[in-house]
Image (cartoon, helix red, strand yellow):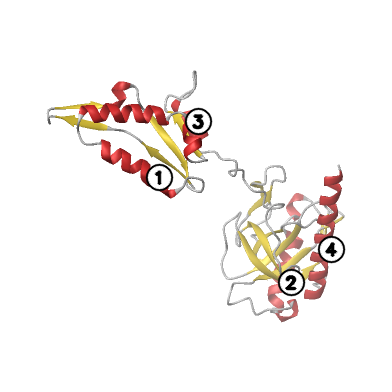
Amino acid sequence: MDWILYVFLSSAIDGTSHILINSFGIHCYLSINVQCFHDLVLRTLMSVILWFMDGNLKTLLILSVVMLTLSSSKLLQLMAPGLEVQSMFGAKGSSPLNERIISTISRNSLAAHPWHDLEIGAGAPAIFNCVVEIGKGSKVKYELDKKTGMIMVDRILYSSVVYPHNYGFIPRTLCEDNDPMDVLVLMQEPVVSGCFLRAKAIGIMPMIDQGENDNKIIAVCADDPEYRHYNDISELPPHRLAEIKSFFEDYKKNENKTVEVGEFLSAQGARNAIQRSMDLYGQYVVESLRK
C-alpha cells in the first residue's frame, strides 16, 4: 500500500519569528512504496529529520540542503529501490494535483477483470467462485460489461417481478451464447453487486432465451449455514422451485421476448455443464494465445 510522507518544516528562532521552508522554495514530498522501501532506511531518514529540527537557523538551512539533495532520484535509487521523489510543483506546465494523482498509480494498480482474472476455485465444478451481478430482491438488471470488466446497468425489468435469489456468473467459463455460465445462488441475504462468493452446484435449469440455450446453474452459498447442507435440487421445497421457474418464464414477457424453461436437472448434470463451460473457456484461451 502506498502512502505519502509530506515534509512541511518550520522552525522558531529566539522564540520571536518563524521561518517556513516554503519561503526557500523547498516544498517536496516523498512517495514511498512500503513493499520496496526498507524499514532501516525509513528509520534513518526520520532520525535525521528529527535531529535537525531543533529550532536553529543554521541547522534548518542544512536540512534544506539535505532535502534538496534527496530530491535527486538517482541518489534515492541507490539508497532504496522503489523510493520516488517528485517536486510538489511538478514538471513544467503540469499542476501539483495531477502530479499527486500520478504518483499514486503503480504498475499493480490495474483493475482485475472478474471474468478472466478471478479464479474459479480448486473445488470446481462442485464448489466454485461466482460473481454476483444482481442481488436478491432487485428489479435492476445489472450485467458484466465484457470490455471493461465493470458491472453496468443493462435495464430495469419490464415486468412487476424481482430476482428471487442472488444472480451472477461463474468466472473462467464460457457457454454457447459467448457469455460466462449463469448461476442463481440461494442464500439467506441479498449481497452487493460485484462481490464474489463460494457456491455449491445443486442443479441446473435448462432454458432457451430467444432461440438460444441459456441454462442456469442452481446453487447454494457454500458458506451460508442455512443452505450449505443442500446437495441436490431435489432436496429443495417444490414451491421454491416453482417460484424460480415462474420468474424466468415471466420476467421478459413485457418485452415481447420468448423464454422457455425446462425441468430441473440434478447436481451431477450441473457439474457436467460447468465442466463443459470450463473446457470451452480453456479452448478459447488457447486459441486467443495462438492469434
Q: Which amino acid lies under the numbered mark 1 shown in the image of this protein?
A: Leu
Q: Who's the residue at 74% across and 71% down the image?
A: 126
- Specify which label sits upstream in the sequence, 4 or 2: 2
Please say whether residue 175 is visible from this viewpoint.
Answer: no
Question: What residue is drawn where x is 37% and y is 46%?
Answer: 43
**For the residues carrying marks 1 and 4, which lies nearer the camera in this image?**
1
Dots 3, 2 in contact, CB < 8 A: no
Q: How many marks?
A: 4
User: Distance from label 3 to label 1 (Cα)?
Assistant: 17 Å
Residue 198 image position (x, y, % from top left):
64, 66
Q: Give the label on residue 74, or none.
A: 3
According to the picture, the residue beneath numbered tag 1 turns out to be: 42
Q: Relative to residue 38, is residue 248 depicted above or below?
A: below
Which residue is at 82% across, 72% downward? 269
Amino acid carrying mark 3 in the image: Lys
Q: Is residue 78 left or right of residue 279?
A: left
Q: Earlier in the sequence, mark 3 or mark 1?
A: 1
Of pointers 3 and 2, the one earlier in the residue sequence? 3
Q: On the image, numbered disc 2 is attached to which residue?
A: 126
The correct choice, above or below, for 47 with respect to 252 in the image is above
Query: Which amino acid does the dot numbered 2 rest on?
Result: Ala
What element does badge 4 sit on? helix
Mark 3 to mark 2 CA distance (whole Å): 54 Å
- How far apart are labels 3 and 4 at the CA level? 54 Å
Pinpoint residue 162: horizontal percent, then vertical percent. 64, 60
Tag 4 residue: 276
In front of the other: label 3 or label 2? 3
Spatial CA distance of label 1 from label 4 is: 53 Å
> Residue at left 61%, top 62%?
136
**Quadrant of the frame with the C terminus:** top right
Query: Which dot, 3 or 4, sits closer to the camera?
Result: 3
